[in-house]
Image: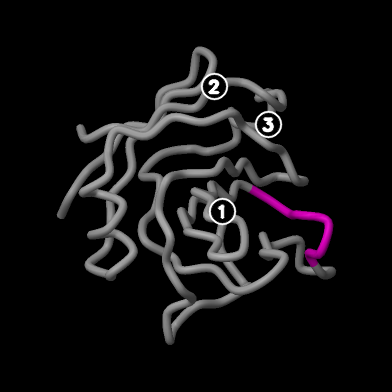
Amino acid sequence: MKKIIISVQDISLSAELNDSAAAHKIWEELPVEGEADIWGDEIYFEIPIDMNEEADARTELEAGDLAYWPVGSAFCIFFGPTPVSTEDKKPRAASPVNVFGRVTGDVSSLRKVQGETKVRVERA
């Protein structure tokens, strides 16, 4: 299993990639950096990858899921409810995303991240 490190502000998170096409494409592009956009309890930033929605793309997620958002060519980190979450308060994407991995530790520290902060993702 391929492992990555996500660094933002003073936070460093470990994550594992799954075996999806999105995971392979992102792995080949690493390292990537971008400015964090915040949408509820989701951080996302544009990356230089153009990929379509995969057959198993979805909007319902779990805290810690990593996904690629085809609409915005973005790397997404979900850590709690978003503005379109329902009563269950689980993360929900604005439109279908390709889930490609998962943070292996606690993601609650991401709540202190502010917009336009640099995010770096690299191979572990």
Q: Distance between the residues labelled 3 and 2?
A: 15 Å
**Residue shown at the point (31%, 52%) measured from the top left:** 26
Q: In this rendering, would 11 be left or right of 26?
A: right
Q: Residues within 10 Å of mark 3 (few under 14, many from 20)?
A: some
Q: How crowded is mark 2: few (under 14 residues within 10 Å), some or many (20 or more)?
A: some
Q: In this view, does 28 lie above or below 60?
A: above
Q: Is residue 6 above or below residue 69?
A: above
Q: Furthest residue to the top? A: 10
Q: Which of marks 3 and 1 is nearer the N terminus?
A: 1
Quarter of the image where the N terminus is located: bottom left
Tell me how many marks there are. Answer: 3
Percent of width and height locating residue 14: 33, 35
**Residue shown at the point (43%, 24%) measured from the top left:** 7
Percent of width and height locating residue 103: 40, 45
As helix, strand or loop, the secondary structure at mark 2 comes to: strand
Residue 60 lies within the magenta run: no
Q: Do the residues labelled 2 and 1 touch (CB within 8 Å)?
A: no
Provide the residue span drawn in magenta: 80-85
**Residue shown at the point (42%, 66%) measured from the top left:** 51
Q: Kindly identify which residue carries mark 2.
A: 118
Q: Which amino acid does label 2 sit on?
A: Lys
Q: Quadrant of residue 116?
A: top right
Q: Quadrant of residue 21?
A: bottom left
Q: In this rendering, would 107 be left or right of 38?
A: left
Dominant SS of magenta comes to: loop
Q: Kindly identify which residue carries mark 1.
A: 63
- Residue 111, numbered circle: 3
Residue 84 lies within the magenta run: yes
Q: What residue type is labelled 3?
A: Arg
Q: How far apart are marks 3 and 1 (CA)?
A: 12 Å
Q: In this view, does 15 lie above or below 101?
A: above
